[in-house]
Amino acid sequence: MKKYDLMVIGGGTAGCALAYTAGMAGLRVLLIEKGIHLGGTITSALVVPAMKCGEHQINTEFYEALVAELSAIGGQATYLDNQGWFNPELTKIALDNLMSKASVEVFFDTHIQDVCIEGREIKSIKISKEILSVYNDKLQISNDTLSECIDAKYYIDATGNCEFGKLCNCEFLEEKNENQPVSLRFMMGGVDVPRFSDWLKDFDKDRNVTTVEDIDGFIHLSTAYTWDKGQKWALAPLFEDAVNKKILKDHDRNYFQIFTVAGMPSTIAFNCPRIIDYTDTLQVKSMSKALQLARQNIFRLANFCRIYLPGFEKSYISNIADMLGVRVSRRIKGKYIYTIDDVKSGKKFEHPVLVSNYPIDVHSKDKDKSTLQIVRDYQLPLESLMSADYDNLFAIGRCISADFMSQGALRVQASCFSMGVGLGNYFAELENLQK
């Protein structure tokens, strides 16, 4: 049986940050990923940029390492005073490089079959040890022959949906009707970005919504529109005309945001469509319907861009995310349940893993019902990453121990990076104390 100090289940933003930090500290780390590359929301869901979380962040070492690695291979840009403009495809390569530097062992395309538990401790997991591309029901092979047991001192659920915690029968915090819409991002290639940028900065003079910058000869831009009435949107007449002419359906325009991508000079990335009809992120039927609806929305939005936005005439859909952008789902019950009052009060903790001022950002399926509330610096305690049910189980990322509204502030990538680094430093300190 193989033995590790840490077993990290899930190779997304939080899981990679933890694995890298612990590996660089000399711990034996196994990172298990169900897909065929690392990066989670950045790579599979095309969620870029990583949003800024204030000037007083802590545990930023992994974020800085990722920025440096991507910059070295042409996959990073600093725009709007934010280093987090990443190229999703090159991020896959950069993360492989970082795991190698930290001596982290990575298992791709791997699923956990079973878990061994004794009292309040997880003892080992069982995974399939070979990929079976062909199933033969006449082939009699014992389950033990096809699987492998692995144990570790500590287990970390970084799956987003807390899938490992579910396998361990942990207690969760989610309640009915605490949902946010999901998104399915996409990209369009073949865009004449210089032409589009010239038109855009003239069409929309509001620099709080639309920005265009030439950075070392590369044009970066960003703009947005929603159907909410709290903001005056320059793009609103175009969307209204498209709905009247049946080029778009009304719900297609509920949220629209676009921007450039580092290292892709003729590509525009879309933070949309946002799917408001199916919000139960833990039900296969609901998410399957969301995916089908989203791809139809994408087709219509691409057509809209070719008709209404100068520079898009010869553009095409170049990439559709292979993972939904999920904002909230299952959340573990931890030793400390973080609350919205903790966010608003800026409560201090003895062992903070992050400091952020990212706003309370909760999307709604209903018009004019979304929340975007500015807050001052707040901290998240280490105890919100510790399972209340098991002494050696932890959770990081969007599935931490937090109530619905506070999780809306904590779920962003920069905070997930800090969670991973903070927990990695904690394990390194534990190991030093035990030597």
Image (spheres, rainbow, N blue to C red):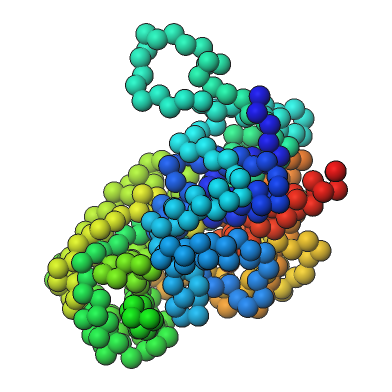
Indicate the position of residue 365 as horizontal and vertical percent values: 41, 63
Left or right: 408 in relation to 139: right
Indicate the position of residue 184 as horizontal and vertical percent values: 36, 57
Q: Is residue 315 above or below residue 33?
A: below
Q: Is residue 129 visible?
A: yes
Image point (51%, 41%), residue name: 33
Quadrant for residue 52, please give it. Answer: bottom right
Q: In which quarter of the image is the C terminus?
A: top right
Indicate the position of residue 170 as horizontal and vertical percent values: 66, 39
Q: Nearer the viewer, residue 427 or 235?
A: 427
Q: Is residue 205 above or below residue 159?
A: below
Q: In which quarter of the image is the N terminus?
A: top right
Image point (50%, 80%), residue name: 81
Looking at the rendered structure, the number of numbered marks drawn on it comes to: 0
Image point (77%, 40%), residue name: 391
Image point (36%, 19%), residue name: 135
Q: Is residue 395 visible?
A: no
Q: Is residue 103 above or below residue 132?
A: below
Quadrant for residue 252, please give it. Answer: bottom left
Q: Nearer the viewer, residue 3 or 253?
A: 3
Indicate the position of residue 160 as horizontal and vertical percent values: 54, 49
